[in-house]
Amino acid sequence: MEGNANVAKPVPETLNGRDDEARAEHVYQLVLEGIVAGKYEQGMRLRERELSELYDVSRIPVREAIQRLEQDGFVETFPRRGAVVRRLTLTDVNELFDVRLCLETFAARMAAMRVSGGESGRLLQELLDETRDAIDNGRTDDVVRLSAGFHAEIVRLSGSRLLIESVKPLFGRMRWIFGLAHNRSNEVQRDEHMELCNAILAGKADLAYSLAYSHIELGREPVLAGLAQTLEP
């Protein structure tokens, strides 16, 4: 894990008196961000002792964080090697898009129905506006983050607690993959987000479903093409 000191962020003072569950959550988020940002590269070992020292916690929350990262598909463990950052495959990418087509289209439909029933879509519009500003000012890293946030807000608007909890790891993986290859024009995606947002805010459930489906499916081939030379099948 040499060269990764720049991802180290000590556990805040506000966590000093909290239990290991809170510490594990904090370490989980820090390591996840390191993976998504490419600072913990695919195939890199994640040593408990080093992470414990890096984040100034005991090994217990580190171990729990690594177990969660493994459950969520970011880490694998091997005999004698321990935990390593998972090596993505093209199959992983395809499966991500397949699952998104099932879950996010449903979420878009439900979000539109709830907005038509009085639920506020203000945050969705704000995320769209922030994404537009990031694109106009060339802040590529922010575009990826805000785009994932836009999709996550649609899921939140669906009102399904089970769906919201189920897709949390999905959006982390989206950010990871799109950080590796994102070959579609940001302006095109912005326009697609705008159409989807407008459909949801107008309460047009069927249109929101269709726009979500086409937006996700149109992103599949460019991402696969961008990763074809670097990922195994």
Image: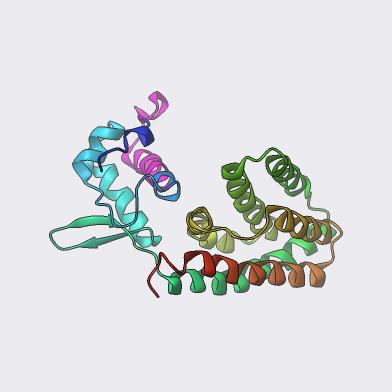
Q: Is residue 164 above or below residue 53?
A: below
Dominant secondary-structure state across the stretch colored magenta: helix
Q: How many marks?
A: 0
Q: Nearer the viewer, residue 55 or 85?
A: 85
Q: Nearer the viewer, residue 185 or 68?
A: 185
Q: Is residue 220 above or below residue 189?
A: below
The image quadrant that residue 61 belongs to is: top left
User: Split into 4 quadrants, where in the image is the C terminus?
Assistant: bottom left
Q: Position of residue 125 (x, y in %)?
A: 77, 47
Residue pictured at 52% horizontal, 58% vertical = 181
Q: Position of residue 176 (x, y in %)?
A: 47, 55
Residue pictured at 28% horizontal, 34% vertical = 54
Left or right of 198? Residue 49 is left
The image quadrant that residue 74 belongs to is: bottom left
Q: Is residue 26 magenta?
A: yes
Q: Nearer the viewer, residue 220 or 74?
A: 220
Left or right of 49? Residue 198 is right
Highlighted range, magenta? 10-32
The image quadrant that residue 67 belongs to is: bottom left
Q: Position of residue 100 (x, y in %)?
A: 59, 68
Left or right of 36? Residue 46 is left
**Looking at this rendering, what residue extends furthest in the left direction?**
80
User: Split into 4 quadrants, where in the image is the N terminus?
Assistant: top left
Q: Position of residue 201 (x, y in %)?
A: 83, 56
Q: Is residue 21 above or below residue 56?
A: below
**Looking at this rendering, what residue extends furthest in the top direction?**
13
Q: Is residue 105 magenta?
A: no
Left or right of 82? Residue 185 is right
Q: How is the image coloured?
A: rainbow
Residue pictured at 12% horizontal, 59% vertical = 80
Residue pictured at 68% horizontal, 53% vertical = 186
